[in-house]
Image (cartoon, rainbow, N blue to C red):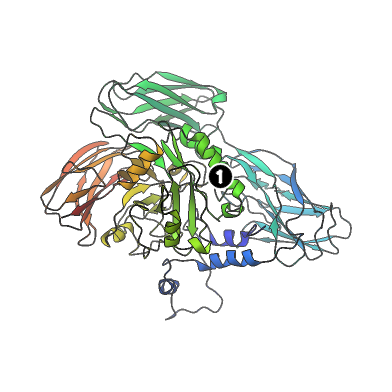
């Protein structure tokens, strides 16, 4: 089983969902002074300025390591314990049974609790602390020597077999949470949360996963939030949908809540029902349709009353109704499930996107090689994702895209989006696709695009020395849960920023990109990743099209008819002399830039950024205190090679960026 277990690499070095906390220890014998920095070495090698070649080398070593027939042998199952509410504590007992070849003296059985989202790390030293794990056997003469790794890798218990071999059919019992503190479960609802076992059958230090790991379901908690999602635009007379969802405190869905949600609009002009009823079988979400009768901007207020009389209130995003209102559709093109380093099944991801977040467009972008069972080694997992993509795809209602993340630790991460059924995984560990150019060459002639993300900083910055063809990479992700990669002066800045590597720097170099945001969520909340984000930053992509099909989405991307937000459904229009954002305009002047914003909170600032001929900078700013704003800016002479875009900041920290206008002769 090639590359079946590289947990020491995965857990020690972080992943696409890693945050800014922590860091790498200085190697023994390293000294400060004039020695070449990692960035210097990366630049000389033609890599990202924050390349992590040691990760790639770890995978290469694992790939070449010979596997003994006994590695990964045996089976494991849950003996005691069961489903658990997210964030609560419990105790679980697992049995491991040696396979037909047993485990040699000096071999090992490795136990790993789910490594993501706050499960208590496995530890065997402090019985009074969470995650304490006791290992026992009834096999006479077998001695167990256990060692729990705290960092790195966290939460891995290696049990060495001593005294004699563990014979076929003999068992070990692992009691996770055996101490008085128990063990803490995942913070988020998660079906099939897996507990991993691996076996080094011959004692050479190389191990493989045991097939079919035991799983438990992590259930949502009590009702704590109400989410109300409207479409952003409609024409008078259109039927529109309101998606209402009752969520737990971490925004997980599936809450079995029953009762009425009272509804009201902040102005007349909608045939909105006064209440909607949820049954327990609705699992906390329901969609109602009504008609938008009159022009105007609407927000719907909702309120529910809990079983103990507590009230939970919410306000929807704005709905702008008008005969000439440009349509806006919403997408999240970047997120992960439990098949890589995220939460839940693929079907849970798509259901949440449609029935809770009320998205129009979504892509599940699990990693090519990053995860306990990576996609590039397990075609069955890619087949499972592809089946769910097609199952949920409903043109005109809900568009799903086949996709994966090309997780290059040498050149930066990109996700690959297909606009036709099928697609396949092109691993960044494969020499044919290990550079951006190799990836683009493999995609040539297909209906696919790539999108660079967290390009200006952590966990790895994009290597912009590879300059993409605008047809292959027409947009870039300027914001996600990692923060903003727009510019060094951006609010919500990405962690570990690399000066000179921001999107604005790339625009100044002559490349042209439209802007999108997406969540890069790992918590099972596509479209609402900001709700579970500690800093309130997420990401969404707005599409200026009414063609809700794969073809329409691709056309919007390639024509840059898109804009980005940090997760809020801010309606933004930025027209330069009547030309919509993303387009090319002719040089000359003066030019009139009209900006219209309908926010999810009051608008604090609207800023105009101009660059290209000179380094990009804010050239104008207007302050506001209302949620609905219309303003205009006069730009003096525009020169060929320049670009202009708008950045919006709300009073609650919500952000939006228009795609740039580009200037030609």
The quarter in which the N terminus is drawn is: bottom right
Q: x, y percentage for residue 395?
A: 42, 33
In this view, the residue in front, 429 or 206, is 429
In this view, the residue in front, 369 or 113, is 369
In this view, the residue in front, 57 or 280, is 57
Dot 1: few (<14), some (14–19), or many (≥20) neighbours within 10 Å? many
Pointer 1 residue: 343
In the displayed structure, would residue 312 be above or below residue 38?
above
Regarding mark 1 in the picture, which secondary structure is present there?
Answer: loop
Q: Residue visible at 34% across and 64% down?
A: 499
Relative placement, left or right, of 424 versus 449 is right
Q: Residue visible at 32% across and 59% down?
A: 488
Relative placement, left or right, of 38 versus 630 is right
Q: x, y percentage for residue 635?
A: 14, 50
Relative placement, left or right, of 505 versus 152 is left
Q: Is there any visible trace of residue 550 in the rendered image?
A: yes
In the displayed structure, would residue 393 be above or below residue 660?
above
In the displayed structure, would residue 322 be above or below residue 158?
above
Q: x, y percentage for residue 524?
A: 52, 42
Would you identify the image quadrant in which residue 487 lies?
bottom left
The quarter in which the C terminus is drawn is: bottom left
């Amino acid at each position: 089983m090639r590359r079946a277990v590289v947990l020491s690499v995965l857990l020690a070095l972080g992943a696409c969902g890693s945050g800014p906390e922590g860091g790498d220890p200085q190697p023994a014998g390293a000294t400060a002074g004039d020695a070449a920095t990692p960035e210097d070495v990366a630049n000389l090698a033609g890599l990202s300025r924050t390349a992590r070649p040691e990760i790639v080398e770890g995978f290469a070593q694992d790939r070449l390591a010979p596997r003994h027939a006994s590695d990964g042998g045996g089976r494991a199952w849950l003996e005691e314990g069961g489903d658990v509410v997210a964030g609560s504590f419990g105790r679980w007992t697992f049995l491991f049974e040696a396979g037909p070849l047993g485990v040699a003296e000096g071999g090992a059985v490795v136990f790993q609790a789910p490594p993501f989202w706050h499960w208590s790390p496995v530890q065997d030293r402090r019985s009074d602390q969470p995650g304490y794990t006791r290992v026992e056997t009834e096999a006479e003469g077998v001695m167990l020597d256990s060692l729990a790794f705290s960092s790195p890798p966290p939460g891995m218990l290696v049990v060495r077999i001593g005294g004699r071999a563990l014979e076929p059919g003999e068992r070990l019992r692992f009691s996770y949470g055996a101490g008085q503190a128990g063990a803490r479960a995942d913070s988020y609802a998660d079906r099939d949360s897996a507990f991993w076992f691996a076996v080094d059958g011959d004692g050479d230090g190389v191990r493989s996963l045991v097939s079919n790991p035991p799983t438990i379901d992590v259930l949502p908690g009590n009702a704590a939030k109400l989410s109300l999602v409207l479409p952003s635009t409609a024409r008078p007379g259109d039927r529109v949908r309101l998606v209402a969802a009752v969520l737990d405190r971490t925004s997980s869905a599936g809450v079995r809540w029953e009762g009425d949600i009272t509804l009201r609009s902040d102005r007349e002009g909608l045939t909105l029902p006064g209440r909607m009823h949820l049954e327990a079988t609705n699992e906390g979400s329901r969609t109602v349709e009504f008609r938008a009768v009159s022009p105007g901007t609407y927000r719907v207020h909702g309120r529910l009353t809990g079983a103990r009389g507590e009230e939970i209130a919410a306000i929807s995003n704005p709905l702008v109704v008008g005969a000439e209102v440009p349509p806006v559709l919403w997408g999240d093109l970047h997120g992960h499930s439990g098949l890589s380093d995220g939460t839940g099944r693929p079907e849970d991801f798509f259901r949440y996107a449609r029935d809770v977040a009320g998205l129009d467009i979504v892509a599940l972008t699990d990693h090519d090689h990053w995860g306990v069972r990576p996609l590039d080694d397990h075609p069955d997992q890619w087949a499972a994702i592809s089946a769910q993509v097609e199952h949920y795809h409903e043109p005109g209602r809900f568009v799903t895209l086949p996709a994966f993340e090309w997780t290059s630790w040498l050149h930066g991460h990109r996700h690959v989006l297909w606009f036709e059924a099928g697609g396949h995984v092109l691993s960044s560990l494969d020499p044919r696709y290990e550079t951006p150019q190799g990836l683009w060459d493999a995609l040539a002639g297909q209906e696919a695009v790539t999108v660079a993300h967290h390009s200006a900083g952590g966990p790895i910055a994009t290597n912009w020395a590879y300059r993409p063809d605008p047809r292959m990479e027409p947009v870039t992700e300027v914001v996600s849960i990692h923060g903003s990669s727009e510019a060094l002066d951006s609010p919500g800045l990405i962690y570990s920023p690399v000066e000179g590597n921001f999107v604005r720097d790339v625009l100044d170099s002559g490349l042209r990109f439209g802007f999108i945001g997406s969540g890069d969520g790992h918590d099972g909340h596509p479209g609402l990743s900001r709700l579970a984000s500690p800093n309130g930053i997420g990401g969404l992509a707005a599409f200026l099209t009414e063609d809700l099909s794969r073809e329409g989405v691709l056309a919007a991307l390639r024509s840059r008819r898109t804009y980005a937000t940090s997760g809020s459904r801010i309606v933004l229009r930025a027209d330069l002399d009547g030309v919509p954002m993303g387009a090319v305009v002719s040089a000359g002047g003066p030019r009139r830039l009209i900006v219209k914003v309908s926010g999810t909170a009051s608008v604090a600032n609207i800023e105009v950024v101009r660059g290209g001929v000179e380094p990009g900078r804010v050239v104008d700013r207007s302050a506001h205190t209302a949620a609905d704003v219309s303003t205009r800016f006069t730009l003096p002479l525009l020169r060929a090679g320049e670009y202009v875009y708008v950045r919006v900041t709300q009073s609650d920290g919500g952000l939006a960026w228009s795609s740039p206008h580009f200037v030609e002769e």
